[in-house]
Image (spheres, rainbow, N blue to C red):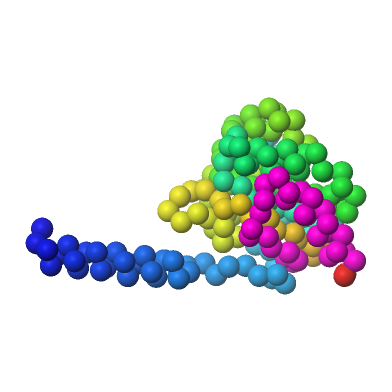
Amino acid sequence: MKRDHWLKLIAVLLFAGSLYGAGVGAEPLAVGQKAPGFQLKNQEGQEVALVSRAGRGWTVLYFYPKAGTPGCTTQACAFRDSIQLIRNQNAEVYGVSTDDVAALADFHKKHRLNFPLLSDPDALVTEAYSVKIPVMKMAKRWTFIIDPELVIRDINDDVDPALDAAVVAERLKKLKGAG
């Protein structure tokens, strides 16, 4: 290829990359918006729909990249160990990843998790929540707190895996106090 062709190709790629990086595509979700609905399978292959949580308490959805990796294991075990603090706030936790049901079942059993993990193998829910890692079929590590009317009340896009459960428990107390 001639030098001019390479330069044009590089310019096109840089332009396309700048568009992609500028957020072209799905708009990020915001506090106060209705949470996108979904129906996913849990680690046991049972269907779980967000609409089933309406009027039943608060919902914590935490998205994570890959079951069994160090950060994801730390985060899941922290939620396991703090689950009662969260449930005392009338909330239920759901971990969401693009792993298949079998991988989630292994992860759930190995770490004796006491809350559901949800499989989003096509990354459709991950995309609906604007947390899909570009070019990959994996989720970013984000946590959403959703009220009983299925409205997003908190979004954490700077999650520390070891501290997420404690942050969620505190945030729930503040949100419930404000409501």
Q: Residue at x 9, y 62 (%)?
A: 2
Check if residue 124 falls in the magenta segment.
Answer: no
Check if residue 171 falls in the magenta segment.
Answer: yes
Q: Position of residue 5 (x, y in %)?
A: 14, 65
Query: Which contiguous range is marked in magenta?
Result: 151-177
Q: Position of residue 154 (x, y in %)?
A: 73, 64
Q: Position of residue 54 (x, y in %)?
A: 79, 59
Residue 147: quarter of image: bottom right
Q: Give the side of residue 140 with respect to residue 25, left or right.
A: right
Q: Is residue 109 above or below residue 56?
A: above
Quadrant, the C terminus: bottom right
Q: Residue at x 12, y 67 (%)?
A: 4
Query: Front-most of 173 and 53?
Result: 173
Q: Give the side of residue 166 with respect to residue 157, left or right.
A: right
Q: Position of residue 29 (x, y in %)?
A: 62, 67
Q: Give the side of residue 138 with respect to residue 63, left or right.
A: left
